[in-house]
Amino acid sequence: MGMRRKLCFTLLLLSVLVLSASLTLANTPQLKSCRGQCKEEFKDRQKKQCLQKCEDDYRQNRRENSYMNEINEPGSDQGQEEDENPYVFESHHFLSKVKTDHGRILSIPKFDRRSKLLRGIRRYRVAILQLNPETVFTPTHFDASCILFVSSGQGTINEIHEDRRDSFKLEKGVLFRLRAGTTFSIVNHHQREKLNIIQLLRTVNNEGQFEPFFLAAGSNPESFFTTFSSEILEAALKTSKGELQRLFSRREQGQGVFVKASKEQIRALSDREESGGIWPFRSQSRGTFRLFKQHSTQSNNFGKLYEADHDDYPPLEEENLSVSYANISRNAMVSPYYNGEATKIAVVTDGDGYFEMACPHVSKSWDGEQQQQEGRSGVTYHKIRSAIKTGSVFIVPAGHPVVMVSSNRGNLEIVCFEVNAKHNVRYMLAGKKNLVKKMEGEEKELTFDAKREVVDQVFGNQDEEFFLQGPKWRQQPGRGRAYE
Ligand SMILES: *[C@@H]1O[C@H](CO)[C@@H](O)[C@H](O)[C@H]1NC(C)=O
Ligand SMILES: *[C@@H]1O[C@H](CO)[C@@H](O)[C@H](O)[C@H]1NC(C)=O
């Protein structure tokens, strides 16, 4: 009797534990957002798989995150709640659109689903396309226009138009614009290296909603062809059901959209001459742009910046974008600055470090009102601070002062897509050409309630521009202190 009671109690305890565990799981915003996305983007079996993956990823990430906190830069605001910082996306936020043994397409969720603060860029999405060595991504189109940036590897991209077919070489640092709906294929002809492509998509149908349309025969994913009734296809193609089945059921168990190719096939596909040409030698709106072949626009010991705007690569004008690549040296930083009109969507391609941003929006709803009643200003700035590493995506809205710092482990490399870039101006807050230096003497005195010489001493010290020594650099013996 006593034994049975004990057993009952244990069972009760267990079920309470399980229940509370699943409740905490259900309540995190990150998991909610992932689930919401599954419900929106998938049906039936795929939806179930997607939901399962949300939970698996979430559990996995809780484990990884506790590790990440340990390696955070010292002095960081540890334990900053995720909902307080909607500006950073880590690997666990990525949703898998397609995943096979030979490649995958991942995307981060819709921006306005993550937070209302990201409404301004809700038409855009970030996706990653990854191809394994000697693999072909078979012809596909997206219902979104898209800027591709090759972050590593090499290959060929082919555009198939009604009247012609263009091929362009891909290598690290290449930019390429794909118009919405253009059918394209990609070949990774390297024997060992993966081809990694970062995509910024501008959606054209539903804001923020984009889908790939796969032409390839296969079951993972399906070809859009096979959704038509067979009598339609038979009539449209003037063929028989048998022929259709032979063609479209070949890869029933097979590879789908990413196909491993033989060495001969790869050679045949990559030996083709580049037909569209490299801008500016051919037609203005066709072709690729090699960002790293340009002169860097900022360069010193602490980093290098490469930039492309619509004058460099005309397709960027239509997309209202500019693209830049910051290669920040070890223990260095990008000087504090803000963008006048552009919102930055940044993807870390290599290294690690952190960024800090002044944000008036998060975490003030209650405090802000409270302070206003007491007659104080309702504006308070919250410090957004977050570790970033290869694969992190972060957003810097227009007007928000920001700084990016590399770690002591090596360079921090970041590709930045600046949305609404056309008339954007970058306002530096430190460095040789900072804003304060351009103020009138009286302005300085009134602004800082200090003598202008004192202001000049603080804001006139830094001789470098854009890339500066980071906080750690200055702490190294025999290095930074010599400047003081
Ligand atoms: C960034 O700088 C490092 C060190 O100078 C260099 O090894 C690396 O190739 C650079 N990255 C790019 C993409 O140029
Ligand atoms: C591009 O930017 C300008 C302002 O710089 C803005 O007025 C316009 O609406 C933007 N166009 C698109 C397509 O986003």
Image (tube, rainbow, N blue to C red):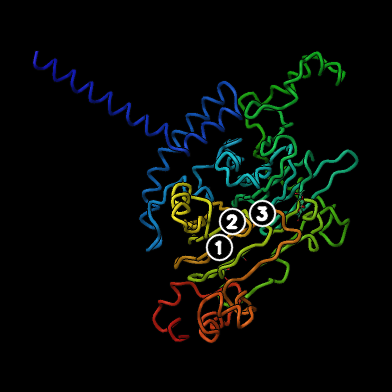
Q: Residues within 10 Å of mark 1 (few under 14, many from 20)?
A: many
Q: Residues within 10 Å of mark 3 (few under 14, many from 20)?
A: many
Mark 3 beta carbon near ligand 1 (under 8 Å): no
Q: Which mark is residue 438?
A: none
In front here: 436 or 142? 436
State the separation of the CA atoms marked 1 and 3: 26 Å
Three-letter code, disc 3: Val
Q: Are marks 1 and 2 in contact (CB under 8 Å)?
A: yes
Three-letter code, disc 2: Val
Q: Which residue is mark 2?
A: 396
Which residue: 53% across, 83% down? 461
State the separation of the CA atoms marked 2 and 3: 22 Å
Mark 1 or mark 3, which has the lower sequence index? Answer: 3
Secondary element at image label 2: strand
Q: Which residue is mark 1?
A: 402
Marks 1 and 3: which is nearer the front? 1
Secondary element at image label 3: strand
Q: Which residue is mark 3?
A: 150
Secondary element at image label 1: strand
Three-letter code, disc 1: Val
Give the image location of residue 335, x and y in percent.
56, 70
Which residue: 66% across, 39% down? 208
